[in-house]
Amino acid sequence: MRLLAGEVRQFLAYLDRAGRGAVGTVTADDVRGFLVEVAPKRTAGTGNVVWSLKRFFAFLNAAGLSDVRVDGLLARAAPRRVRALPCFTREETRRLLEGVETGTPCGKRDYAMVVLAVSTGLRCCDIVALRLDQVDWRRDEIRLVQAKTSRPLVLPLPPLAGNAVAEWILHGRPDCDAPEVFVRLQPPYVKLGNSTGSTLMRRRLARAGIGHAARDGKSFHALRRTTGTRLIESGAGLALAAQILGHVRIDSSRRYFSWPVSSSGSAACRWRTSPAPRRDCDEHVHQQFRAQIGAMLEWRTSLGQPCATCGTRWPASTGSARRITPARRC
């Protein structure tokens, strides 16, 4: 709904600049002119614009506000240009985490957010909106509704990420009534803003000595792509990795996974073959994701879904020992 409203708002602004005082005076040439104007700004394609205009004019036609039929004009949008987006290397991930000073409240918060993103693949908007009651410390799970898709998602909470979040809650988070896990460090103690991810990454990339330029892909969202790539490298199938990332369709996940150019074999072959071979670098990160895969499989089978590999149903025990058990302070 937000996407539809945003695209229609831009179309109405274009009509206002064109001198169209009412939607009843709009012509097919106006629709065509709007598409020509916005196309250079949409480097990924105009699929969302076409989709929104179709539904807007379907409403206008049904309400008798316009007799313009755009089905023929907008029969099919050009396919979206999809490219594999870069992720952080293992060395960059290590430097990013080690560069965070965890002795300050700001460092504790940033470290918890980065570790949570790398460990679970959550989007920045979902991490910012994560509430205290959405973390199940007894079962080591996170239960939330994704902001982008409005679909529920349950993910295992690895000990490393859980301990980082607990450290922030116990020894860094201000005493306040805000329901969110991550809040501002200065009054008012409320939910973080939408620009938190970009601000955090600029600060932490500079401290870690990692070069960053415009459109190089080294953003907070790159941590999510890093999770997807590490999952595939650790032996998870594409379907399971897509489920952990919260994607409805597997095709949406393909551009999240990338491999070094020097790797043997083509990327197309790797999509078809079974799990990528185990690598002897950064064993800690490798084992971390192996545990996450196992926890996710165990959680799925606890709901009655058979294992994709052997077809067996595992018991519903998904909890793991926690070294820190935080108490809610707000």
Image: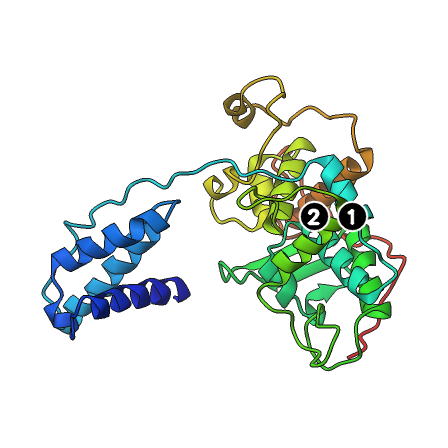
Under mark 1, the amino acid is Leu
Q: Nearer the viewer, residue 151 or 99?
A: 99
Under mark 2, the amino acid is Val
* Residue 23 percent coordinates (x, y): 16, 71
For the residues carrying marks 1 and 2, which lies nearer the camera in this image?
A: 1
Residue 158's tag is none
Looking at the rendered structure, the secondary structure element under dot 2 is: helix
Q: Is residue 230 above or below residue 22?
A: above
Left or right: 167 as drawn, with respect to 91: right
Residue under label 2: 118
What is the quadrant of the C terminus in the image? bottom right
Q: Is residue 76 visible?
A: yes
Residue that extends furthest to the top in the rendered view of this protein: 264
Please report whichever mark, 1 or 2, sits nearer to the chain's N-terminal start: 1
Q: Is residue 156 visible?
A: no
Looking at the rendered structure, the secondary structure element under dot 1 is: helix
Does the residue at mark 1 contact the one at mark 2 (Cβ under 8 Å)? yes
* Residue 275 percent coordinates (x, y): 64, 27
Q: How is the image coloured?
A: rainbow
Left or right: 298 as drawn, with respect to 27: right
Q: Residue at x 31, y 55 (%)?
A: 49
Q: Residues within 10 Å of mark 2 (few under 14, many from 20)?
A: many
Quarter-of-image position of residue 113: bottom right
Residue under label 1: 97
Q: Residue at x 24, y 45 (%)?
A: 76
